[in-house]
Amino acid sequence: MTAGDDQVRGLLVSGRFPELEDALCERVRELRRGRSLAPLTVVVGSSSVRTRVGDLLVRRLGAIANVSVVTLGRLAADLVAAVRGAPQPTLTGLARERLLRRLIATRELAYFAPVRDRPHFPQAVAATFTDLREACVAPASAWARAALGPETGRDRPSGAAKAVDLQGLYGSYCDELARRGLADGAQQLLDAASAASSAGVASRTRLVLYGIYDLNQAQEALVAELLGAGADLFVPVPRGGCGEGATVLEAARAAGLAEQRRETPSAGADLERLAELWRTSRPVSAPAVEFRGDGTLTVVSVPDERAQMREAVRAVVAAVDEGAASWDCAVIVPHGDDVERAAAGLEAAGIPVACRRPDRSAGPRLLQRLADCLAPPAGEPFARRAVVDLLSAAPLRGSDASPREIALWLDEARQAGVVSGLDQWQERVGRRRHGLERRLADLEARGEDLASDDDDAAEKLEVVRLRLAAARGLEA
């Protein structure tokens, strides 16, 4: 298929990913207008982008039938299988390494002889040969000497030996694939290009290539056939970029596609929308604020909470350096329980924190838990969990309770059968305390027996003492 056929030429749209997402949804909606059950395939470069695009289409367009999102490799496998009538045997992963290990073991090597038995040598050779196959380099093209260069390839005996080893292994590898009737990823792409040129792929389904910008030669052969058949192409280009380095644009221009550039929003638009959101009191049912992604708001991926606070400190310092007043800077955390940790991290970095919202100091926390205990929003007063939370927040005994003590309080209340209500606390905890006192007296009466090497009995005595102390604490 070529651009000169009767196929309608596709669209070529370039821009940043936020603009490309809008353009993709518009194009899918346009292609399905009046043909809601016509098959449509969106081809992407990776499985991560496939997940993103699938979620995007469902979120923006709702339930859509006969729309599939596949990677370029998956499309190639499907095209070859459709022509052959069965999936093509493909050599990848461990099978490819085992084949190379066998070829290395049966071949005389000069330069690589010292490392031929190392476990990672076949993996390194496999990666090199994958690049060569994707670049469509023929085994007899003297590529090894050209790659090594004149200084190392001709003047040094070691360079010549390396070239001989690599070229011999590469030729044996390609011959073995052909002898066994196997294909690797690169061969599958080339076979898919041939299948697309003869099978009329565009007549069966509409294709949209999305987010693909860098291609090797094998991928370029397939993409060129798809574009010539009328596929649409959406190419990501950064703000202010011209698409230099995006090899897919060269294939699109060769197919005669005219580029449509999506303009980026003016810088500051997102900040204006965010400021408007903070200035007004929005009802719950108000529409969500949609940002344009103009670059003024950034997303930073971090591995853990420490890195998160480090990036927050950098953002505050950068804002102050650019002239912002420090009292106008705010760090927003997702949960109220994270406020104190975030404030401590900022203060440790030398950034004073004027106020915390909500206030998580001991006083307000104690009052809130007291209110939950005496007048809960639902259920009876003096609920078991509310009382234990109040005891853990209130320094009633002149010192803070340890996590072990809090856990024992909660477990003793559960063992006593307390659910809620002041009467249950007085009656059931008292009965639990009396039972523990009798059990402790029983164990202490066996003092001479416990003095022996019976570690289990001694440990049981210590557990009863701890539980009795917790029960007495609850009763007090």
Image (spheres, rainbow, N blue to C red):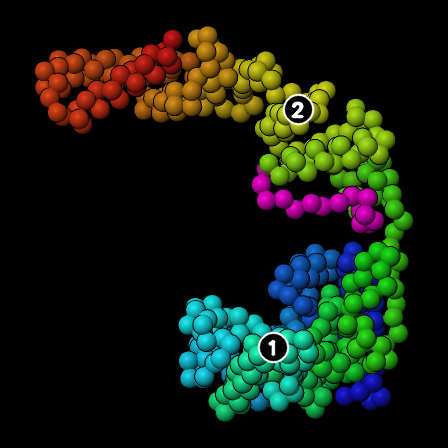
Q: Position of residue 251 (x, y in %)?
A: 79, 77
- Which image quarter holds the N terminus? bottom right
Q: Position of residue 349 (x, y in %)?
A: 66, 27
Residue type at tag 2? Glu
Within the image, what quadrant is residue 365 found in? top right
Residue type at tag 1? Arg
Taking 15 as reference, is 432 left or right? Answer: left
Taking 281 as reference, is 221 left or right? Answer: left
Which residue position holds label 1?
A: 156
Asked whether 293 falls inside the magenta stretch, the response is: yes
Q: Position of residue 276 (x, y in %)?
A: 85, 36
Q: Earlier in the sequence, mark 2 or mark 1?
A: 1
User: CA gap, disc 2 to disc 1?
Assistant: 61 Å
189 shown above or below 415: below
Main SS of the magenta part reads loop
Which residue position holds label 2?
A: 347
The total of numbered circles placed on residues is 2
347 shown above or below 306: above
Q: In this rendered view, identify the residue nearer to me: 253 or 4.
A: 253
Rendered residue at 37%/12% (across/down): 473
Q: In this rendered view, identify the residue nearer to me: 280 or 268.
A: 268
Rendered residue at 68%/84% (across/down): 193
Report the span colored magenta. 291-305
